[in-house]
């Protein structure tokens, strides 16, 4: 019997990773060192908004509201497709497939975009330390090979790699933070970075856009429901733990960056490539060796994020292949590793093609490959989170389950409001993120790709409904284990379990 024919439809061998290893996956995807040395620096340089640190607790609060309903749903639906299955069982199969298309686009674009960032960082470091003047794409391809190998290996191998890299980069970030708070540039701990008046400036759209991109990855825990020891608890615990850790860490680190260079000088410093923010501060405070180690950890941080997003993308592809939405061969797993081998290889090939095109055309790996990929991912995942929050409300309506009204309705409604606000601000102010003129074609094309993916996959769901009804019926349900809906005494068991609160399609 092949893996595809096996009755137990799960990735590999259940029960390999617990809460802490899964948390390392999620935090690694968010990449703390990359956020400090890349995201926060870029935000200050692009927007000039000193109140950037305040944006992180605000974003954390909105995402926490989303996580309440998301975590509650994760206890009842076990599917490597995560958002795909949540949307399918909450809003309907067409919405599920449409959301899957957006998820595949989002996770692929940010993972591929990170190859640009990795290539630039590794090339600069190698040139400085060893005199190796290799192009960025050479380093990108080398890292791609390693990520591809880890992707087809057992999931616990990736967990070990990510945990080791994560601990090292978090230590480096904490060292920077301590140095900034102990020796602030102006001799005092300024609170300007936490003042609302410093955040609500014309560049706030760019702050929220780049800020939400820093959190991408925390929500991917549900993709590992078939890999964890306790699917009904591990995902929820790891997601809340991850959000809490990175929310606090990002707020403190962004504030520390303001203190390290001073509120009046930090924007100019971030806009000057020669300033070497934040490594120049670390060199001054702790010596060149510490700064060099931190630079290495930036590179490993990006690598860890690439590996984490690769695994998430592979699992989405696996779920869609297993249920017949995508070609069936994509639902195959390794006989020994249990890893979603076909999905992993497919993601590697897509990334290879994208990097090859950007390299052949001589496009900029940072301002184009990385920036575009991050922006598309942020827009796409916010849209999916909004849909998922609405799906949570519909999923729990009429179901006799233990979740509270706060989990079922109040938190998801508040999450929709907060997420929609951020999404609108991010799209309207896309020029501040992309570095283009307001109203330029790029500000329409990149968000348009998200809409295009949603429409195309939605149309594909309609085709499946007409031509392959057996596949359509399995959408979002074929691989999942869901808590059955109690049948009302007034209804027969043959009747639908709920009226008015089931899928829309």
Image: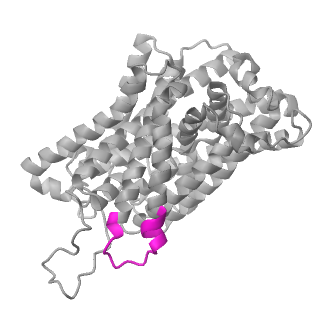
The x and y percentages for residue 66 are 48, 57
In this view, the residue in front, 384 or 232, is: 384
In this view, the residue in front, 346 or 70, is: 70
- Quarter of the image with the C terminus in it: bottom left
The x and y percentages for residue 69 are 45, 63
In this view, the residue in front, 256 or 125, is: 256
The x and y percentages for residue 187 are 92, 36
- Quarter of the image with the N terminus in it: bottom left
The x and y percentages for residue 495 are 14, 77
Q: On screen, 193 above or below 437?
A: below
Q: Image quadrant of residue 396? A: bottom left
In this view, the residue in front, 91 or 280, is: 91
Q: Image quadrant of residue 501? A: bottom left
Q: On screen, 183 above or below 229?
A: above
Left or right of residue 287, residue 112 in this image: left
Query: Which residues fall within the magenta stretch?
Result: 394-411
Residue 173 appears in the picture as rendered = no
Residue that appears at 18% across and 42% down: 460
Most distant residue in the bottom direction: 489
């Amino acid at each position: 019997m092949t893996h595809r024919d096996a009755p137990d439809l799960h990735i590999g061998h259940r029960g390999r990773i617990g809460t802490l290893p899964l948390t390392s996956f999620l935090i690694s995807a968010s990449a703390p060192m990359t956020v400090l040395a890349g995201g926060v620096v870029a935000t200050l340089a692009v927007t000039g908004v000193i109140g950037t640190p305040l944006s992180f607790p605000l974003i954390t609060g909105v995402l926490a509201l989303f996580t309440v309903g998301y975590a509650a749903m994760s206890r009842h639906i076990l599917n490597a497709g995560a958002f795909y299955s949540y949307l399918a069982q909450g809003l309907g199969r067409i919405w599920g497939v449409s959301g899957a298309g957006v998820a595949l686009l989002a996770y692929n674009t940010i993972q591929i975009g990170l190859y640009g960032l990795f290539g630039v960082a590794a090339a600069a470091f190698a040139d400085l330390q060893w005199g190796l003047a290799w192009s960025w794409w050479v380093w990108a391809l080398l890292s791609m090979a390693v990520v591809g190998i880890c992707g087809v290996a057992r999931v616990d191998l990736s967990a070990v790699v990510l945990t080791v890299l994560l601990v090292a980069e978090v230590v480096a970030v904490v060292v920077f933070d301590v140095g900034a708070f102990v020796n602030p540039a102006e001799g005092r701990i300024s609170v300007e970075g936490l003042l609302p008046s410093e955040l609500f400036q014309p560049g706030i759209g760019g702050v929220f856009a780049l800020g939400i991109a820093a959190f991408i990855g925390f929500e991917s825990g549900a993709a590992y429901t078939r890999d964890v020891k306790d699917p009904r608890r591990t995902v929820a615990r790891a997601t809340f733990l991850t959000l809490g850790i990175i929310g606090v860490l990002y707020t403190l680190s962004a504030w520390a960056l303001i203190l390290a260079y001073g509120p009046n000088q930090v924007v100019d410093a971030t806009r000057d490539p020669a300033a070497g923010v934040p490594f120049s501060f670390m060199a001054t405070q702790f010596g060149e060796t510490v700064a060099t180690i931190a630079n290495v950890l930036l590179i490993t941080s990006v690598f860890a994020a690439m590996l984490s997003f690769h695994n998430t993308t592979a699992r989405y592809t696996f779920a869609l292949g297993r249920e017949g939405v995508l070609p069936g061969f994509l639902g195959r797993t390794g006989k020994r590793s249990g890893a979603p081998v076909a999905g992993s290889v497919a993601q590697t090939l897509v990334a290879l093609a994208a990097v090859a095109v950007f390299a052949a055309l001589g496009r900029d790996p940072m301002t184009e490959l990385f920036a575009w990929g991050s922006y598309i991912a942020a827009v796409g995942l916010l849209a999916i989170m909004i849909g998922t929050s609405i799906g949570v409300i519909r999923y729990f309506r009429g179901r006799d389950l233990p979740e509270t009204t706060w989990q079922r309705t109040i938190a998801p409604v508040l999450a929709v409001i907060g997420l929609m606000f951020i999404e609108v601000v991010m799209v309207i102010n896309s020029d501040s993120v992309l570095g283009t003129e307001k109203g330029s074609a790029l500000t329409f094309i990149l968000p348009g790709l998200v809409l295009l993916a949603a429409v195309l996959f939605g149309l594909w769901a309609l085709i499946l409904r007409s031509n392959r009804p057996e596949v359509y019926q399995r959408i979002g349900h074929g691989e999942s284990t869901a808590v059955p809906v109690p049948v009302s005494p007034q209804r027969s068991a043959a009747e639908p379990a709920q009226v008015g609160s089931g899928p829309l399609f």
